[in-house]
Image (cartoon, helix red, strand yellow):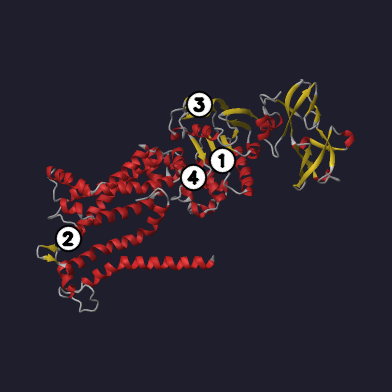
């Protein structure tokens, strides 16, 4: 269990800046998720903690110990890779105890730990098999088993669930969360999937172009995104972003979308509104009118695409509230009060 | 479309059959010739004849097995050194792009050099080191072409081995060399097996270096075979029997490596 800190960490590949002046503290025992589009530097950041990438400049420390120039084996970490990276020539049991034996542990003592881990992950019946005889989900469990066999200071996960099918991914997600709560080991998890990031993290860090855009609890980031990138990256379906003019509390777009907002302006802004905060109302209560273009039924809820002149809005509506809603109909629209976000059009930063 | 495909099928079968005959016919002829008497050999097309075991007796009493043993020894030592050094070299070239494309080019370029350019410097060197007519000289010469081929062959296998497994081993507590031995090498074991057999065959078949560096007491199998070309003329029957002694192990080896060889070559970076 340990804190991981980055001080002014920079990573360059030739002239390409992968991580730009990173100052970061990952809290002890917390599940931190690094999320962002591919090429944002999240995996590089993780690999720098592991010692698999050199740091161009700056200091990384684990548990107050400067590990910047230590070999991976001396950092007291364990890691799970996207493709599981199991040792194909070893059995499941040998895979799991590998980190124990590699550090000079006794085979006899390792057996006890092996049984505990196998039981925890429900793979006791697979121990004598070779990795290639296992399904993807089972391989994943073995990889996790190997990571937790030792009690390292930090767990590192590099998109461990992205090779699994959707159903298994959700199951393993819950399981990972349960394990981490149980073991209380500082965990750093990298994913490009914002949903995974939202569900898993105690602390969520959104990265782009080698920089941290926002760090906070998932709910904070969802409710108060710092800029339009975070706003549209987090949440599914994405937040609607509409350009327009904000003048003393009234926002108006060229296409005719209107809403009462914060008393700012006059200023060119981008208005953000989450799909679930768009209300379909009778014409008399509406701020503006829209045409229902497409209705996608998801079960209890439906995604409704609205058209306002050349602009499209995505709304989520409870199926029970749908009433007479159908494609082609004109409806009144209103944004839920105090749920709009305003961003500066030029800087894209929250106002 | 179907009809065209099947005519392609027939054509390809014809080509394969034809190629097989071209390759197999001389071997068959050698087999028959090894049982022919001197006079029967005067008619190369003769198929029906009374077989004789004279040629085989002569070959067996000529010390051919000692020579075969020497060839095997040379092959095994050459391959062992090539595999140890070649695997480390190939790993370095594959992972760290050591020397960039110059290294890869250099390895190939060395293959283009005709043996005649190298053999006399080798001979001179062997003479000065008092190693002429020893197997050490032959092994050293064989390393000059087996080691690059084995290295080149293995690069492709290291390229194909996932980097993460090695990184996992580093995180799990091994240093680089231990990770290489315990985790990376097992992944390329099939490639190393194929490379070993391939390298062995190259060494086993070499006449040129062996003939010049060790023509006497340390004669290897190909040198012994060439020895049937005497000052009284070619002892063709005996030579054919000796050729078969040399060919059969290679045939068996080829049978075992063919699949891996094809996979290695089609796998990408392995080209000769």
Is disc 1 in contact with disc 2, using a CB cutoff of under 8 Å? no
Q: In the rendered image, which quarter is residue B52 located in?
A: bottom left
- Residue A170 drawn at (x, y percent): 64, 45
What subunit carries mark 4? A
Q: Is residue A124 above or below residue A279?
A: below
Q: Is residue A322 left or right of residue A268?
A: right
> Label 4, on which residue?
A85
Q: How many other residues sit within 10 Å of disc 1, few (<14), some (14-19) or many (≥20)?
A: many
Is disc 1 in contact with disc 3, using a CB cutoff of under 8 Å? no
Q: Are marks 4 and 2 on the same chain?
A: no
> Label 2, on which residue?
B226
Extreme residue in the left direction: B232
Q: In the rendered image, which quarter is residue A194 located in?
A: top right
Given this view, does label 3 or label 2 mark the residue nearer the observer?
A: 2
- Residue A196 drawn at (x, y percent): 63, 40
> Label 3, on which residue?
A10
Q: Could you say which disc has been placed on residue A268 in the image?
A: none
Q: Distance from label 4 to label 1 (Cα)?
A: 12 Å
């Amino acid at each position: 269990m340990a804190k991981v800190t980055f001080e002014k960490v920079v990573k360059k590949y030739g002239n390409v800046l992968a991580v730009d002046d990173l100052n970061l503290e990952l809290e002890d025992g917390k599940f931190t998720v690094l999320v962002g589009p591919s090429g944002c530097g999240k995996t590089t950041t993780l690999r720098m903690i592991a010692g698999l990438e050199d740091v161009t400049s700056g200091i990384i420390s684990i548990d107050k110990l400067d590990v910047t120039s230590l070999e991976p084996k001396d950092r007291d970490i364990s890691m799970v890779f996207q493709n599981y990276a199991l040792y194909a020539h070893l059995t499941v049991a040998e895979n799991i105890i590998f980190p124990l034996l590699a550090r000079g542990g006794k085979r006899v003592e390792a057996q006890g730990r092996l049984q505990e881990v196998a039981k925890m992950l429900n793979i006791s019946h697979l121990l004598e098999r070779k990795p290639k005889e296992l399904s993807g989900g089972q391989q994943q469990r073995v990889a996790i088993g190997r990571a937790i066999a030792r009690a390292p200071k930090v767990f590192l996960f590099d998109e461990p669930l992205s090779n699994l099918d959707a159903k298994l991914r959700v199951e393993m997600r819950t399981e990972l969360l349960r394990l981490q709560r149980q073991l209380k080991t500082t965990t750093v998890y990298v994913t490009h999937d914002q949903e995974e990031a939202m569900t898993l993290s105690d602390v969520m860090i959104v990265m782009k172009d080698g920089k941290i855009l926002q760090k906070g609890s998932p709910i904070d980031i969802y409710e108060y995104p710092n800029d339009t990138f975070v706003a549209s990256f987090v949440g599914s379906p994405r937040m609607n972003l509409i350009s327009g003019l904000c003048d003393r509390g009234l926002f108006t777009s060229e296409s005719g979308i209107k809403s009462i907002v914060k008393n700012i302006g006059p200023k060119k802004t981008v208005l953000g509104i989450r799909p679930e905060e768009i209300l379909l109302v009778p014409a008399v209560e509406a701020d503006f009118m829209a045409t229902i273009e497409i209705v996608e039924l998801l079960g209890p809820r439906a995604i409704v695409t609205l058209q306002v002149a050349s602009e499209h809005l995505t709304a989520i509506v409870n199926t029970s509230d749908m009433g007479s809603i159908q494609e082609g109909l004109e409806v009144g629209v209103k944004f839920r009060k105090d749920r709009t976000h305003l961003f500066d059009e030029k800087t894209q930063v929250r106002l | 479309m179907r009809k065209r495909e099947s005519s392609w099928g027939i054509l390809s079968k014809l080509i394969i059959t034809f190629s097989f005959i071209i390759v197999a016919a001389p071997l068959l002829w050698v087999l028959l010739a090894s049982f022919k008497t001197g006079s029967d050999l005067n008619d190369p097309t003769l198929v029906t004849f009374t077989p004789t075991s004279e040629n085989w007796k002569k070959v067996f009493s000529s010390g051919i097995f000692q020579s075969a043993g020497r060839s095997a020894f040379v092959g095994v030592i050459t391959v062992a050194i090539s595999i140890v050094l070649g695997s480390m070299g190939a790993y370095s070239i594959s992972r760290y792009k050591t020397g960039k494309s110059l290294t890869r080019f250099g390895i190939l370029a060395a293959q283009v050099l005709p043996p005649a350019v190298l053999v006399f410097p080798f001979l001179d060197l062997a003479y000065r080191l008092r190693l002429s007519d020893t197997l050490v000289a032959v092994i050293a010469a064989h390393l000059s072409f087996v080691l690059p081929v084995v290295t080149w062959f293995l690069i492709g296998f290291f390229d194909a081995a996932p980097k993460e497994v090695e990184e996992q081993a580093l995180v799990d507590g091994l240093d680089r060399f231990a990770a290489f031995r315990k985790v990376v090498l097992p992944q390329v074991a099939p490639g190393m097996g194929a490379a070993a057999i391939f390298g062995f065959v190259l060494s086993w078949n070499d006449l040129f270096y062996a003939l010049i560096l060790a023509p006497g007491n340390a004669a290897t199998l190909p040198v012994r075979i060439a020895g049937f070309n005497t000052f009284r003329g070619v002892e063709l029957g005996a030579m054919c029997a000796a050729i078969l002694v040399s060919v059969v192990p290679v045939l068996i080896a080829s049978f075992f490596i063919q699949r891996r060889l094809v996979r290695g070559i089609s796998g990408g970076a392995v080209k000769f």
